[in-house]
Image: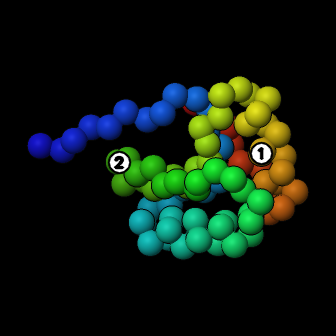
């Protein structure tokens, strides 16, 4: 049987979603190059055939929005805040 792991509580910034693991990993590597200031890991959460590239978790909406604004300035698009 598959092991079920619980996601960490908090808010996440989703920066992309892909149908293939390779595409998600390539985008993650791109983000690592483009966001050298990012102190948190950039993770990939896979479920039901969708691979979400995310930052976080963040404890507060204010913290998530501040990081989201920095990402927007660096990449030219704003991530989506997810619970």
Kindly identify the residue that appears in the image at 78 percent across and 44 percent down.
67
Q: Is residue 81 left or right of residue 63?
A: left
- Identify the secondary structure beneath mark 2: loop
Instruction: Pinpoint residue 19: horizontal percent, then vertical percent.
Output: 44, 62
Is disc 1 surrounded by few (<14), some (14 to 19) or many (20+) residues within 10 Å? many
Residue 28 is drawn in which quadrant?
A: bottom right
Q: Which quarter of the image is occupied by the C terminus?
A: top right
Determine contact: label 2, label 1, CB under 8 Å: no
Residue 4 locus on image (x, y percent)? 27, 37
| Position of residue 45 measured from the top left corner of the image (x, y, whole percent) | 45, 49
Q: Which mark is residue 13?
A: none
Q: Nearer the viewer, residue 47 or 32?
A: 32
Please, which residue is most extreme toward the left here?
1
The disc, 2 or 1, on the residue closer to the chain's N-terminal end is 2
Q: Determine the CA span between mark 2 and mark 1.
A: 26 Å
Q: What numbered label is drawn on residue 48?
A: 2
Name the residue at 74% across, 28% down: 61
What mark, if any, has residue 68 been given in the picture? 1
Foreground of the two, 42 or 14: 42
**What residue appears at the point 35 percent right and 48 percent down from the top-left corner?**
48
Nearer the observer, 59 or 20:
59
- SS state under label 1: helix
Q: Residue 29: x and y, percent?
A: 59, 71
Residue drawn at (58%, 50%), measured in percent from left and top?
54
Q: Quadrant of residue 65?
A: top right
């Amino acid at each position: 049987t598959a092991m079920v792991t619980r996601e960490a509580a908090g808010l996440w910034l989703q920066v992309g979603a892909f149908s293939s693991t390779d595409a998600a990993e390539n985008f993650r590597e791109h983000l690592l190059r483009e966001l050298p200031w990012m102190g948190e890991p950039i993770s990939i959460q896979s479920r039901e055939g969708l691979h979400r590239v995310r930052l976080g978790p963040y404890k507060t909406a204010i913290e998530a929005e501040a990081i989201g604004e920095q990402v927007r300035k660096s990449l030219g698009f704003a991530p989506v805040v997810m619970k």
